[in-house]
Image: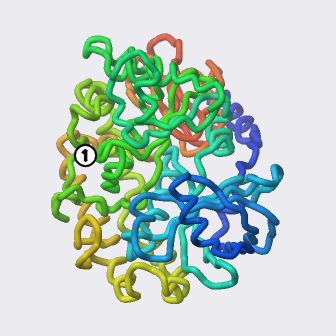
Amino acid sequence: MKKIISLFTFFSHFILVFAQQPGDNFFNQPIIHEVKLNFWQSGYWDSLTANYANDAYMKCSVEIDGISIDTIGVKFKGNSSYNNQSDKKPFKLDLNDYISSANIDGLKKLNLNNGFKDPSFLREKIALDFYNEHGITAPRCGYAKLYINAMYWGLYTVVEEVDKTFLNGRFNDNDGNLFKGDPQGDLKWIDNNPASYYSKYELHTNETQNDWSDLVYFIKQANSPVNLFYDSLNNVFHATDFLRAWAGTNLFVNLDSYIGSGHNYFIYHDSTTNKFRWIIWDVNETFGNFNMGMQPSQLTSLAYDYINNPNNRPLAKNMRLNALYHATLGYEMCDLVFNGFSITELNAKIDSIANAIRPHVYADNKKFFTNQQFEDNINYDISVPGTPGGSNILGIKSFIAARRSNLINQLNALGCIAGIKDFKPTGMHIYPNPGNGRVNIFSSSKQAYILLGSEGGIITTGQLQKGNNEIYFNCSPGFYLLKTEDGMVSKILIK
């Protein structure tokens, strides 16, 4: 025992200092940002509209929280959020399009989203905060008051751009290919010709090389025969990360996604692991706001392993057919429901954010809904005739209560509550446990670890990344202790 105590004492002083990510100050401050766009061109709105069809930027100056940049690129963005009669359009800002060193807290691009179809102004913020807090790779979100030529244009959500800055911050690598699953990223196999995929996906890095061979190979593995599928996919994909993202997407019933509409995601070929990683994108229609013709009761009771049209979603379909992947999906959903999707905690956060944004929502004369609809939709479902996709808009708090209750009933059949109780006290999730030494470890932060034998001796050391980690401990059968830098201790049984 003395060995263990002295070793733990040593470890408690072994602190690693990690570099701050770009955007930490910008997104972690509990403030409403101010973004002031200034156009000097006459007819600038017509130019922005014309540029939308060509996906082209135009020049303007910007002031963000008092910091001025003389010339940036700005353009309209979005699909349904753009194609409406309102002047409250969504924007993308490229801060270093004309001045290469320009940035805000290390960020080079920002997305300003207009709250289309969201009376509560909460959907993106609540979902993206949840994903980032629970190890699911997704952009961060804040709020900004937008001014155009000194006129208040309304309250927007500010969403982090998925670009090389994002990749380096999340994965410590940005050399690989980043693909966006748009406009039709169903991941169905076509053939070995990369050109066959050009119209279905977008390459967002290394465009000059234009090498799509890695994506084609990944899609081929995702469509492997059943008897080869697990190993084929695992060799090219951080599969557990995707399963957690699938669970998170389903938890908030975001059907304008791969499991629903078949697009709205990024997939990145990490050059350090030589595997693809999944990145969530575009969550403005979470909380069942993209309903695919379903009624509110169907949305809140959506099956935890739901896939729309499985034959057109081969990655999810084949993972659901594989017993190990399917079990892991259930575990990930169970973990998110019982270790984060708390009515008390989420309602308190909702109230706090609503109080902060309320004056700016009320002052927004270009918003899509009334002040009363903002207030009502925070708490319960409302009906707004003429809303694209259906008049029923699920309430934020009522959705959380109904969704959590239904998922608990679904997951009880998996026996997940006992499993979560076993893991919850440690603050870390390890599975399978017991296992053969190859384990998945979900860590809430990036931190070092020590694996100890039952007598207290050091077996090995290493480092956990925030989120899911796939690790193989080449050890003899027996009990081991995993001690992490934050003081948590977990038992591992190797058979």
Residue 465: percent from the left, percent from the top?
60, 36
- Is any atom of residue 220 visible in this view? yes
The answer to whether residue 420 of the structure is visible from this angle is no
- Residue 387 in the image: state x and y as whole percent: 28, 73
For the point 55% across and 62% down, which residue is it? 50
66 up-or-down from 138: above or below: below
Going by the image, does 288 lie left or right of 196? left
What residue did someone put label 1 on?
304
Residue at the spot 47% in from the left edge and 20% down from the top edge: 236
Q: Quadrant of residue 405?
A: bottom left
Residue at horizontal 77%, vertical 43%? 17
Label 1 Cα neighbours within 10 Å, binned few <14 / some 14-19 / many ≥20: many
Q: Amino acid at mark 1?
A: Tyr
Q: Secondary structure at mark 1?
A: loop
**Foreground residue among 42 and 270:** 42
**Residue 193, image x and y in percent?**
43, 18
